[in-house]
Structures are given as C-alpha cells and as structure tokens.
Image: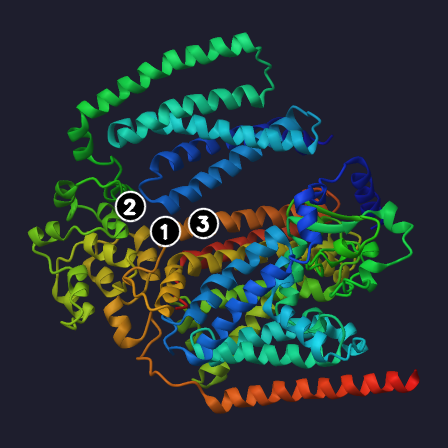
Amino acid sequence: MSNLATKQNEEVETKEPFNLLNYRPVKAFLKSRWYPGIFQWIAFAIFSVIVFELVAGTMNPSRNFGTSTTWVLWWPMIPVIFLFLGRFWCAICPFGKLSDIVRKLVGSERPLPKFLKKYGIWLIDLFFILITWSDHIFGIIESPRGSGYLLLILVTMVVATSVFYERRAFCKTLCFLGGLAGNYSRSGALSLRGTPEICRTCKSQSCFKGNDKVEGCPMFVYVRTMDSSADCNLCANCVKSCPNDSIVITPRVPTKELWFLKKPKLEHASLAAVIMGIVFVQNITMLTVWKDILAYISKFTMTDSYNVNFTVAFIISMIIPIILLLGTAKLAAFKGTKQDVINNFTKFGYAIIPLDLAGHLAHNFFHLITEGKAIYLNFFSLIGIEMDRSNIAFGTTSTVQLLQFAIIALGFVGSAYTTYRIGDKAGWKKLWPYYLLMILLTIVNIYIFTLPMGHRV
Amino acid sequence: MDTSSASWKQIWFPYINYLMYFLGVGLISGGIVHMPIEPLRYSIILAIGSAIFITAAFLNEIYIEKKKMGVTQILKLLVYSFILSLGVGMIGGGIQHFSDLGRYAVFLIPTGIVLSFVSYILKNGIVVPKKQAFNISLILVLFLSPLTLGLDWYVGSNNNSASASGHGHSDSGDSHGDSDSGHDDSSTKEEDSHSDSEDGHSDSDSGHDDSSTKEEDGHSDSEESHDDSDSGHDDSSTKEEDGHSDSEDSHGDSDSGHDDSSTKEEDGHSDSEDSHGDSEGGHDDSANEEEAGGHGHGGPVKEEPPNIKVLSAFGALNGGFVLIGLFLKLKNRRKGLNNE
C-alpha cells in the first residue's frame, strides 16, 4: 500500500497539475456569490414545479412534466454529471438548497451524532436499496403521485435533519443518492484538492471551519487531508474561504482515483457490487423475460404475489455480484495476490465502479433517447401548447443499442484497467480472476441490452 | 522481459494501435457521410470513431514514439488529431458516397482536404515560413476551386439520376437518409417495399409520410390506422387481418414509437436485427395514449385531484419540524443571553 502512495506522490511531484482556477474568469466566478447560488435557485425553481406537477398534475405518467423530467431527464443525466463534474449536482441540488435555507432560518446547528457519522454510509446504501425496491413494489416511477410523495418524504428528511444538525447532514449521511454519487464521483473527471505544501503550514483551517462570510465544508471534508472526490460537492466554499489560495481544481483521467486508494472501505466495495445487481434487476424487470423469471421464482415461493417474488429476485440480483466478487477475491487470494479475501474484496470491489457507471448510463440512455421528447412535449403542454406526440423518441432503438454497447465497452476498459492499476500492474497470472469477473459482468450487461426493454413514460 | 510481455510490446500493442488508427478513420468517415441519414446514430458512430482515433494518436505519441509532452502539448495533439481524422473521414466518405450524396459530397471532399492538410501541419509541428505558407495556400486554392466547381457541375448535371438511385445500402439507416435529405424516393420504396425487411425498416424512422406509396400498394398499414384516431381501430386486429402487412410498414410504426409487436411476429418480414428495436419501442400511438393513458403502462389512467390529506400530513410534519427548530433556536438564544 505504501508503494502505491509513494508512486502517487511521485506523479504529483513530477507533473504540474492543470488547474482550472488558474483561469481568472473561472476563479472569479467560483469565488463570487453567484456560484453555486444561481444554479441552486434555477434548480430549486424547476424542482418546485416538478413537485407541484407530481402531486397535483395529471396522473398520466406519459403526460406529466414531473415524471418525464425526473425519470427521463434527471435520472439518466445524474451519472453523466458525476462522471464529468464529480458531485457538482450535489452543490446545486434542491434538497441541499432547502437544507441551507432551513438551517439558516431555524437550524440549531448541533454536531452530527456519532451513529450517523459511523453508519451513515450504510444508511445511504440501505436507503438506495429500499427506494429501488419500493419503486418496483409501489410503482413509484410510473406513478406521478408516487414520485411526488417520494420527493416529499425526502423533503421531510431534509427539513428534520437540517432543523437539528449542522451543515448538510442529510446529504452526508442519509441521501439515497450519496453512495452512488460518491462511488461515481471517484471515477469522475474532475477533482478538487488542496496544495499539500500550502496546506501543511495553514493554521486557519477555514476550508473546514469556514469564516465570517462562508460556511465551512458542508460535507464535513477537510481539504488538507482529503484524498477522494467522493464527498466533495464542488460547492467552492473552500475556494472562497481559503486565505492561501491553496485549492486546485484539476481535470483527470476518469477512474484515476480508483487506482490509488489509500483506505479502501468495505461499504463502498459492497455498494459497487450491489449497484451492479440493482442495475441488472432494473434492466431485467423491463425485459420480456421478466415474467418467465417471476413464474420460475413462484415455483419456489409457492405464491403468485408479485411483491414476494420480486423481492426474492431483487435480493438474488444483489447477492449474485457480491458472491461473484467474493469468489473472485477468494480465488485471487488462493492464486497469490498476498491479500486475504476481505482485503481483495474491498480493494478490487472498486474496480467494478466503471462498469456500474456504464451499466447505469447505458440503461438510462435508452429512456433518454427513446422517450426524451416527452420532456419538452410535457413542458410545452404545461404552458398550454400541445404538440404532436406520435413519436417521442430522439433516435431508433438500434441507435440506442449501439450507444449502449459502446458505453459498456468503455466501462469494461475502465474496470479492467482499474483492476490492473489496483493490482499494482501485476501480470495476467495474478489478476486473471478479476479480469474474468469483469468479462463476465460485461457479457451479462451486453446480453441484457440486446433484449427488448420497456419504457418509463 | 518475459516472452508474453515482449510479444505484447512488440507485436500486439503496435498492432492494436494501428488497428485503432484505421478503425477510427473508418468509423469517422462512415459517421460523417451518413450523418444526414440518421443524425443521432451516426453522431454516435462519429464520436466513437473520434475517440478511438484520438486514443490511438495519443498512445502512438506517448507509448510508441515515447515523446514527452506537457498537458498543453497533449491537448494540442488530441485536437489536431481529431481534426485530421475528421478531414480524412470527410474525404473518404465523400468519395465513397459521391454518387448518392451529391452536393453533400461536394462540400465534404474539399473541406476534408483543407482540414486534414492544416491539421497535419499543426499536428506534426511543421513550421511554415510566411512566403511558403502563401504559396501553399495558393496551390490549395488553385487545386480546390476547380475541383469543387467541377464536382458541383457534375452533381448538378447528374442530379436526377443520383437522387433517384437513392442511397445504395440496404440497411435501415439508408432509407432514412433518403427521407431526411428530402429525396423523393417513392419509386424506390415501391420497388423495395415487399422485397426485404431491412430496406423497409428505414422509412418509418424518418417519420415521413409516404402514404402515397402505401396507398398504391393497397396495404391497410398501421400508420394509416393510427392516423385515424376516431375510428378507434385496434391496431393488432388490423394487422392480423392484414396478412401482407409489409416490413416497411411495421418497422415504420415501431420507429416512430408505436407498439406493433404482434404484427412483427406474424408478418415474418422482421429481421432479427430490427425486431429487438421494434419491440423496444413499445409505445402506443398518441390516440391510444389519450384514451388508455400512456405508453405501455397497462390500463386507462384515472385522473384524480391532489390528495389533500396526504399533502396536509406532509405539510404538518414539516411545519412541526420547523416549529421545533424555531423553539430550539429561541431557547438557544435565550441561553446565550443568560450566559452573557
């Protein structure tokens, strides 16, 4: 592990980072009060319309502006944003803005409870799984009211945590998107860091504590010791508050952070494997073979209840990638990577993240491209302009497939290369179990994308 | 160095790099030239080709030529490589499809020559003195002007035959191109409509109205039945009766977002490649959507007013939290005042 850290340090020392903050307009904008405020207010305004439409608009998901904007535009775009801009979405997220407002008005700014600090990431994983599960059980996506109530539940959670706790406690420890955001942002192409030489001598710690004008890091991150983009919102509070201009925002090769993990965590690796399972189950439920799978499961459960059979399928889908990763870790440990199974599982679990991201993107691009016109059609409908709805697709399904295969191929390259780097550039002989796992997951993904899929709106 | 590592460095890696170079150029040229046919699809192919080409250029410079470069140099290399690949692609694509893309090819070929030439010079860091640059520009103008004018004249004089022959391929995208580029290819469709499913697929996606063709064919195709929403046709039954509903029609519906899976199963024209997409597209038509409430979500949607009880509960809950917050804040403030 120390070798990895040394190599990383060497790289940092030998290459001058390409710092976006070297560009005056960028720096001036990030330091101004307009950032991220202007984006936050725009997002907040759109969010308000969406919530209103979901809870009070038409019950027809195809015609509801809230449904199409949330599930056809926002959800597919989220991983794209994470990939290119890290957790920038979290900086402008309406829930985050709501948290800021509530805290400013009625917040008592208590410190985060230990329980949330310790188990927050597990809660995030749990909520993510729960929401995905309940979507299928209660049909949240297909029901505007269901989607609206989900958002209102989240609003309530935001209000409750913001009333009691400091900073963005909800975003840090409870937001269902947090785990996904963290994992995907690790693969992201943008990173914010402090300059070690400057931070080493800093005594103000204003990036973490804040100052008179700016709040400290809302995600409880101390830039000086920060070595991951998983929790950085790119809110630029630290850019504003740092008295020494230590902050550097650099583009980087996607997945690069995964190559040099100093403290890999079991919960992140588990989530990576679970997300793969969830992406599978999301895909499978939209396939025509889904009914056959349910029928098969019902033979064992002895009931025709969709909820029971789906739950079984859901659990199996999540467990399979974990078992596969565990098996691979065991095999690799047996074949001599000099690490025990759990260590291998934790370290190489991160290598699945690029494939997760690819699967998520590929799945959701199907919706974005084949149902995308619904977004603006429903918007125009909202302001009283009715347009032709005979074709709501931007492209043909064969086009989408092409894109899906390309994305999965990229994901595979990302995962395989990450495996190679995490494995300290070891040869095929040592790492073949992981490569085999990546190939297997890629094949399953590609196979799933060759099957017919249903629509959201 | 073991043998596997040596063979990777000496054979496999350079080969893959070489392959990526030319595969990239091939995809780019295909993407550019077919762009008007189906913009999204071919933009993706273009993007993939560009990514492959740029990666190959990068790998070649860094790992094969082992050049040491800074960030700016790498960025320049990537940009120039991209423009070079675009230029080469434009020339290649323009030549290949000159007969059927006419004026587009007249634009592609000279532009491609200029782009590839300039980017080649920039990419390789060739320093061109002012005088030489003037001469080179003059040669380019003298060469390209007659070339462009000549090609344009040729296309103009052969316009009718070029447009009537349509796009030579028999894949789905090609007939899109015809429709998108505004060609009147009704004659082609009349000839092809029953012949092969691949040809037929394309018309639909472009969403253009070739009803005249279909009327001549005498089909009661699904597009027509969709149009007449008041007639309340059941699409599936129409198609079941319409024993010879051709692939052209059925594909058309699917691409424009209709659900005609039953047709495709029965008419037997659907090729395996397309059938996936067709069933995926599973949208009901707009008329049905109005009545049945949407795309494949089952039964009719019953409109309901907002659930005041649920909303009130949320309001009360959030209001309660806000009140608690207010109370705590006041309490803290008092505490602070007392401490002072």
Determine the secondary structure under disc 1: helix
Place of residue A414 in the rendered image (x, y in percent of width and height, measured from the top left): 61, 48
Quadrant of the image occupied by residue B278: bottom left
Q: Are marks 3 and 1 on the same chain?
A: yes
Instruction: Please give the residue where the numbered disc 3 appears in the rendered image.
Output: A403
The answer to which of marks 3 and 1 sits earlier in the sequence is 1
Location of residue A233 with respect to A17 vertically, above or below: below
| Residue B230 located left or right of residue A161 | left
Asked whether the viewer can see residue A457, the reply is yes
Mark 2 vs 3: CB contact within 8 A: no
Q: Mark 3 Cα within 10 Å, few/some/many (few <14, many 20+)?
A: many
A259 and B126: which one is in front?
A: B126
Image quadrant occupied by the C terminus of chain A: bottom left
Q: Residue at x 51, y 54 (%)?
A: A443
Q: Are marks 2 and 3 on the same chain?
A: no
Determine the secondary structure under disc 2: helix
Chain ID at mark 2: B
Location of residue B48 with respect to B305 vertically, above or below: above
A443 and B193: which one is in front?
A: B193
Asked whether the viewer can see residue B9, the reply is no
Quadrant of the image occupied by residue A448: bottom left
The kind of residue tagged 2 is Ser
Chain ID at mark 3: A
Q: Residue at x 51, y 86 (%)?
A: B311
Instruction: Please give the residue where the numbered disc 2 appears in the rendered image.
Output: B172
Q: Distance between the residues labelled 2 and 1?
A: 9 Å
Mark 2 vs 1: CB contact within 8 A: yes
Place of residue B208 in the rendered image (x, y in percent of width and height, measured from the top left): 22, 50
The kind of residue tagged 1 is Ser
Instruction: Please give the residue where the numbered disc 1 appears in the rendered image.
Output: A398
Q: How far apart are marks 2 and 3 (CA)?
A: 16 Å
